[in-house]
Amino acid sequence: MDSESKRQVQGVDRNSALPDALVCHILSFIPTVYAVWTTLLSRRWNNLWRSLPNLDFNDEDFPTKRTDHFMKFVDFVLASRGSTDIRKLSLHIRHCENFSTGDFYRVHRWICAATRENLVELDFCLLFESRQNDELELPLSLFKCKTLEVLSVQSNCITYPAATKGCFPSLKVLDVSDFRPDVDSMQKFFSHFPVLQELTIDAHPYFYNVFNIKVSAPELKTLRISLDYFSHNYMRPNNIFINAPKLENLGVTNGVLTNYILESKRCPERTTIEYDDRCRNDDDDWFRDKDDVFEDEAPRFTNRAAALLAKVQNVKYLSLDSRPKCLEAWCVPALENLGELDLVLRDCYNWELLTELLKRSPKLEYLGLEHKNTSYELIYDEVEDTPEHEWNPPEFVPMCLSSSLKTICVYRFKGRRYEMEVAKYLLNYGEVLNTMTISTKSRFNTQDGCPYKTEEEICKEFRVCQKGSKNCQVNIIYDAGFDFSEFLSKGSGFSS
């Protein structure tokens, strides 16, 4: 190439050569303030940001916390747009200082403007470190927007107009995370969703607030509810009424502090339940355990936990995480259709619960066990082998062990005595078991001078353990450290 041709190539503005549609597509994936700055890269891009289908406003993208800078920029962008529809609006306000009543009105106006531009998705966050007296009511135009399909709201200063017939005609996905919510307005918010398919509610009730929420969504397939309580309202449980005849997936956290009423006879196929009795204290950053705060409430917690489990007894998949004494073994209903079970064993307290679940799940094919500590004081996983951790094998071998259970996975295995006894029992009586996978750590701790089993000891015990199924493969997964290869070569059907 001669020198003249090189000069011509060097003078080409390759950015300007890109198609407008491609440039707009690329700019839609970055914060809008940066998209506006790209006008410095090419003269032809000067007006492209005005036609972006996705707008992303975040006060964290501004070097100062001054509210007026951020607010003026959003006003400027929305006023400068052309006729292009707004497909997605992300509006995150967390750090603006001196947010005034007039600023609330401007935010309200922005959302209304977006709904007039055929808005499809809104991701809205309005959070303040100290909640102000002012509150923003979501605009009714958002509820009536015919094009809105996805809505995410995170706030501690929002109220909700009452949803009525005709609201959210196209909304399919809704995610609400509300800290210290306005209970009166929130209770009426979830009552009319004609085509909603996925709903997530993450609420943090405060003081003596009590929810009586009715979820009505005839097309709802996935529902996740998490309620994080403060210590004042543990004696006044919430009531969640669920009318969702097509519900397939249900996820519940803090189940013992809420009454769940499933109005449809159809049972979700997949259910995840975390029975948690912890409450936040007034400092909003520490948890207090039931044993320290409201031991007398244990029977009520157990009854509510049992009631929820009974409502979903026809599930095919169940994930169950219960803190000590929240769910007793006698609460377990017959789980005739259960094929997959994930069970969290808190401090190894739940052996009786495991036994009962095995006895009442005749078609169980997969069992996952995870060991977790309940108390935050047990930083180093130091839990003693005490009588309350004792494993008592069932009087009769559960039907699932002899006929259906094929896969077992154990996570965070530490080699405690009762852990070993349970694993050996399952391996010994699992007549159709194909795989047992044990996930452990390379480091084991000691308690009162009694060490947990080392990796070498664990490997030896499993290698000589009797198996009910000749085809069963035992897999040990570990972080690092001891090399199992010497032992693996000595035993058939044993690997890591």
Image: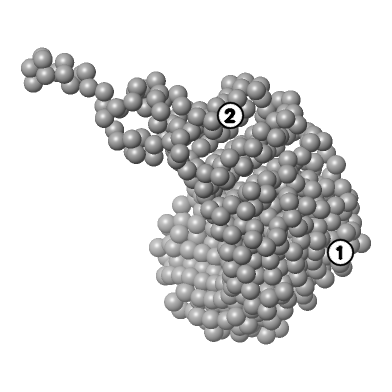
Question: The N terminus lies in which quarter of the figure?
Answer: top left
Between 256 and 31, the residue placed more toward the observer is 31
Residue drawn where x is 47% and y is 74% of the image = 434
Separation of marks 1 and 2 at Cα, in angstroms: 54 Å
Q: Position of residue 357 (x, y in %)?
A: 67, 75
Between 59 and 361, the residue placed more toward the observer is 59
332 lies left or right of 3 = right
Q: Can residue 392 be seen in the rendering of this structure?
A: no
Q: Can residue 21 be seen in the rendering of this structure?
A: yes
Residue designated by label 2: 75
Residue drawn where x is 44% and y is 31% of the image = 49
Q: Position of residue 186 (x, y in %)?
A: 75, 53
- Labels 1 & 2 near each other (Cβ < 8 A): no
Q: Which badge, 1 or 2, comes first in the chain's sequence?
A: 2
Task: Say which amino acid is labelled 2.
Answer: Asp
Q: Position of residue 33 (x, y in %)?
A: 50, 28
* Residue 298: mark in rendering: 1
Element class at badge 2: helix
Residue drawn where x is 10% and y is 14% of the image = 3
Q: Nearer the viewer, mark 1 or mark 2?
A: 2
Task: Say which amino acid is labelled 1.
Answer: Ala
